[in-house]
Image (cartoon, helix red, strand yellow):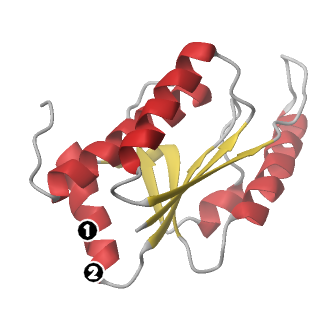
Amino acid sequence: MNIHIITVGKLKEKYLKQGIAEFEKRLQSYCKLKMDEVADEQAPEQLSDKELAQVKQKEGERILQKIKPIEYVIALDIQGASWSSEQLAKEMDKLAISGKSSIAFVIGGSNGLSDEVLKRANQKLSFSKMTFPHQLMKLILLEQVYRAFRIQRGEPYHK
């Protein structure tokens, strides 16, 4: 299976880089992993609705350039479906069986995802009603993808 993680913004925190590197290493025996970071749009703290839409649109254009036409896109969105780890494993397994072996997970920036990216998504997934920093979300997502592969293969994992 091919897993493609697309995120907005450069990862700077050393502890997050170390955690991500660990899961990249662990995932090598389960999938072909590709990660793309697109630049976040510089914007002031306080944005008008119009400015917010422009920021999301520019970031969205960068994201869409990274998505391949064959990829099944799962956008991380607070309004998305809420799955358990077992459900994620089941959904990934179903996709693979149905010939959709390339999955792109998309994590937006601090302002969220553009409407265009959400329209391109085949599925919207929410990890929580809480808001997480998008850099931390990358680590959480990788851990859950790793856990999903372990579940699929009946290998032990922490509950």
Disc marking residue 97? 2
Which of the 4 quarters of the picture holds residue 146?
A: top left
> Type of residue at label 2?
Ile
> Type of residue at label 1?
Asp
Compared with residue 149, is residue 54 higher up or lower down, i.e. above or below? above
- Determine which residue is flagged by label 1: 93
Residue at disc 2, secondary structure? helix
For the residues labelled 1 and 2, say whether their Cβ atoms are less than 8 Å apart: yes
Q: Is residue 83 visible?
A: yes
Image quadrant holding the N terminus, namely bottom left
Residue at 34% x, 55% y is 29
Q: Position of residue 105 (x, y in %)?
A: 52, 54
Disc marking residue 129? none
Count the marks: 2
Image quadrant holding the C terminus, namely top left
Residue at disc 1, secondary structure? helix
Q: How crowded is mark 2: few (under 14 residues within 10 Å), some or many (20 or more)?
A: few
Residue at 47% x, 42% y is 24
Residues 48 and 70: in front is 70
Q: Where is residue 121 in the image (x, y as percent from the top left)?
A: 56, 64
Which of the 4 quarters of the picture holds residue 54?
A: top right
Residues 127 and 37: in front is 37
